[in-house]
Amino acid sequence: MANAQTLDRIFELVAPFNKKGIELQADTTFATDLDLDSLTVMDLVAEIEDAFDIILPLNLLPELETIEQVAAAVDRIVADND
Amino acid sequence: MDLFDKFDALIAQKSSLPFEKADPFKVVMDKVLSETVAIIEGRETILAGTNNYMGMTFNEEAIAAAKEALDNYGTGTTGSRVLNGTYSGHKGLEKTIADFYGMDHCMVFSTGYQANLGMISTLGGVDDYVIIDADSHASIYDGCAMGNATIVRFKHNDIESMEKRLKRLPAEAGKLVVVESLYSMLGDAAPLKELLETAKKYGCTTLVDEAHSMGFCGEKGRGLCEELGVEHLADFIVGTFSKSVGTVGGYCVSNHPKFDVLRLVCRPYMFTASLPPSVVASATASIKALERSGNRRAHLWENARRLHAGLKAAGFTLATETASSPIIAVCLPDPLIATKFWEKLLLNGVYVNMALPPATPAGYNLMRVSVCAQHTTEQIDEITRRFIATAEELGLNVKAA
């Protein structure tokens, strides 16, 4: 489980990309639910990286399908950096 | 389970495009009359989308050298560079390129794609970082996917976005920054000086892909690094023979003292047959000719500027403010209009590349024109006229500025 604060922050960052206006949940998926193409995903990743001052490596992205998974990955990376 | 089911969406998308008489993915050149004219479906067509920037495909010296190599060495080497596939011509070509760049080492690959694939996958080890521009060519992305490094991506040509990320990486880690000098789709130039200086500030090794700038950027045609005076900041320069050189193949040059070990560890170099002797001979002759092709370079830039100005004056929206390369990308409002425009333009006797999202940055729908040094001024004006005529036929609202 991701840290609740992290999850909230990711919800905030995803909100501007929610063009379909669906209700964002922890299990909302980027590709199917939010219908994000690879270019938009790239912009979102950059926002998340800058918000947490981390690197989300490209190698990791295929495994991150939901908001919850991204939040958990962010927590892991932040913990590793400390 | 049919393994092809995963492509159903793509098949559906492709068949939804309203092509009637021509298909951009199925163009066949029946005869190639010159660097700039071919016969397609019986029509004489101006080639304005072949990346044949310096028009070297029919260079007399290159053709003569290729014929002689065919007679003397046969049609192919049937082997890897590290087994039986290195002929004197391959060594000669590597020396020619190293001398051209004034660098110590050169490795020739069988394609430009393999040069990027091999260099990036081999240099980036499991504990290293490879830092790339988001708009990188597929060969760079594939090199990243093939290797074991951690891949970090920054916003296209954005120095600040790159620096922010470099700051977050461990100071002591191995870091390879990969950038292109001119980007293929829009023809926009990278702020190479600033990017390379920033990379060096953070202790990175640098690789610059000059595929779309070699031949016509810089006084000797070595590329944008030469033009900007930053060759000393590029640890590796990668290039291709399939554009300005007019044949096929790729290369990497470097001053790194251990460079030659790559011949024993770089899989896309080792596990494929080497270039045929005729290709090697024509590439060698062509590069020697390119070095002294100052007039041709000047004419190419004149052509690029003339086409850019002509299309701009006619009211077309162009991807770059000025002609920053021989790639002139015309932006159209949506994929449907782009599809119709491409087809009509071809029927009007001009071949360009159609490029649609997701292959294009920022969702552009492009008619991508690549200008050739062998285009005459008349041909450039003819291309502009046929663009205008095509827009009129489609009732496209293009307003003269």
Image (cartoon, coloured by chain):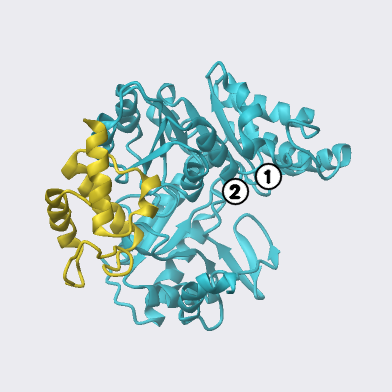
B213 w.r.t. B21: above or below: above
Identify the colour of chain B in the image: cyan
Q: Residue B369: x percent and y percent?
A: 46, 59
Which kind of residue does numbered mark 1 sit on?
Asn
Say whether residue B112 is left or right of residue B342. Answer: right
B384 w.r.t. B115: above or below: below
Q: Are marks 1 and 2 in contact (CB under 8 Å)?
A: yes
Kind of element beneath mark 1: loop
Name the residue located 66 percent from the left edge and 46 percent from the top edge: B247
Mark 1 closeness class: few <14, some 14–19, many ≥20 residues within 10 Å: some
- Which is more toward the observer, A9 or B356? A9
Identify the colour of chain A in the image: yellow
Kind of element beneath mark 2: loop
Q: Residue A12: x percent and y percent?
A: 12, 56
Q: Chain of mark 1?
A: B
Q: Residue tagged by mark 1?
A: B59
Say whether residue B264 is left or right of residue A43. Answer: right
Residue A43 visible here: no
Q: Residue tagged by mark 2?
A: B55
Q: Residue B316: x percent and y percent?
A: 32, 66
Residue B392 numbered tag = none
- How many labels were placed on the picture? 2
Q: Residue B130: x percent and y percent?
A: 41, 35
Quadrant of the rendering where the C terminus of chain B is positioned: bottom left
- Which is more toward the observer, B273 or B54? B273
Q: Chain of mark 2?
A: B
Toward the front, the furthest residue is: A1
B389 w.r.t. B134: above or below: below
